[in-house]
Every structure is written in structure tokens, then in C-alpha cells.
Image: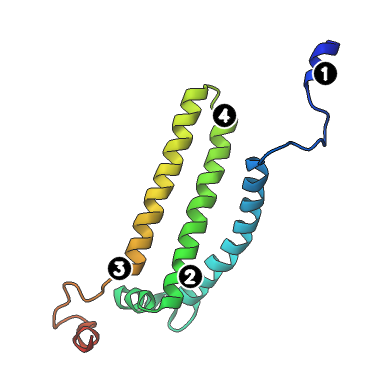
């Protein structure tokens, strides 16, 4: 290595001026991972271990959960964190393995667009879910929907 090439490489541990998106992405991955562990295991505990276990999970059970604002926000937080966490992880993989600059940009944009679309769609489903659409008298939800 020549002296000129060594002079152009910044010394280790020097502060990089400006925003450091990679650092914040790294911090986000650690923080969101910890929060996701709590959200996911809470979700699994309530759905699979509490009450009658897996035998209680049906349309009425999900409808009941999505009628409660606490569970709506729990599911939306899990959705948002998981999708952003996953897209950021995929972005890191694309940056590591795709050498062509244009292809890398296209793939990263596609990742974020797909994640954004799924976040919007999933959030709309959670907050606009109506279990009474199409309910007939033979449904276990009939009484609930008649009172609404």
C-alpha cells in the first residue's frame, strides 16, 4: 500500500460527521429484536397456552381479540416492528451481496416499498376489521353482531 492510499483512508475510531444511518439501523435491529421477543411470546402465550389452548383459536377468538384496542395495538406494534426489522435485515443482505449499484438500489427500494405496502395493508385490516360482515343465524357470532 502506498503512502498516498493510506492517507485517504480515515483512521479507525474517528467520528464520521453527519448522520450515521448504519449505526441507527444497527441499534434499531437490537432494540426491535428485544421488543419483538416480548410481543411474539406474549402473542403465543395468549393464543396457544391460555384458556383452552390451540383449540380456542377460531374466527370468533380472533374477532374478539381484534375488537379490543389493547390487542389491536399489540398486533400493530408486532406487525410494524417485524416488517421494518425484516426489511432492514434484507437491506443489509442486499448491500452485502449485490455488487451492481443500480441493482442494489432497485432491490432496496423494492424491499421498502413492499414493507410499506404490507404495513399499511396490515394496519388497515387490524383497525377496520368487522367480524359481522356476512354473519348468518347459524354463526357463533350471530348474537354478538345482533347486539352491535
Which residue is identified by label 1? 7
* Callout in the foreground (3, 1): 1
- Measured from the top left, where is residue 146 in percent x and y? 18, 87
Residue under numbered circle 4: 97
Between discs 4 and 2, the one toward the N terminus: 2
- Asked if residue 148 is positioned above or below residue 63 in the image, the reply reads below
Residues at marks 2 and 3, CA–CA distance in whole angstroms: 15 Å
Residue linked to disc 2: 74
Viewer-nearest of discs 2 and 1? 1
Nearer the observer: mark 2 or 3; the answer is 3
Instruction: Tell me residue 110's x, y (percent).
Output: 42, 37
Quadrant occupied by the N terminus: top right
Kind of element beneath mark 1? helix
Disc 1 to disc 4, how far (Cα)? 28 Å
For residue 32, the mark is none
Where is residue 74? Give x, y as percent. 48, 70
Which of discs 1 and 4 lies nearer the camera? The answer is 1
Mark 1 near mark 4, Cβ–Cβ under 8 Å? no
C-alpha span from label 4 to label 2 = 34 Å
Q: Which of the two discs, 3 and 4, sits closer to the camera?
A: 3
Report the side of 77 relative to 1 (left or right).
left
Question: Between disc 1 and disc 4, whose residue precedes?
Answer: 1
Q: How far apart are marks 2 and 1 (CA)?
A: 51 Å
Name the residue carrying label 3: 128
Say whether disc 3 or disc 4 marks the residue closer to the N-terminus. 4
Work out whether mark 3 precedes mark 1 in sequence or the reverse, and give the earlier one.
1
- The Cα–Cα distance between marks 3 and 4, rounded to whole angstroms, is 40 Å
Amino acid at each position: 500500500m502506498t503512502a498516498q492510499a493510506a492517507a485517504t483512508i480515515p483512521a479507525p475510531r474517528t467520528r464520521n460527521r453527519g448522520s450515521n444511518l448504519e449505526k441507527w439501523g444497527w441499534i434499531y435491529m437490537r432494540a426491535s429484536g428485544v421488543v419483538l421477543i416480548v410481543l411474539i411470546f406474549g402473542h403465543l402465550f395468549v393464543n396457544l397456552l391460555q384458556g383452552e389452548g390451540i383449540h380456542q383459536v377460531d374466527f370468533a377468538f380472533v374477532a374478539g381479540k381484534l375488537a379490543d384496542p389493547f390487542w389491536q395495538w399489540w398486533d400493530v406494534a408486532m406487525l410494524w416492528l417485524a416488517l421494518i426489522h425484516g426489511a432492514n435485515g434484507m437491506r443489509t443482505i442486499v448491500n452485502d451481496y449485490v455488487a451492481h449499484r443500480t441493482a442494489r438500489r432497485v432491490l432496496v427500494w423494492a424491499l421498502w416499498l413492499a414493507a410499506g405496502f404490507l404495513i399499511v395493508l396490515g394496519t388497515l385490516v387490524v383497525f377496520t376489521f368487522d367480524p359481522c360482515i356476512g354473519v348468518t343465524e347459524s354463526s357463533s357470532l350471530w348474537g354478538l353482531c345482533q347486539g352491535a
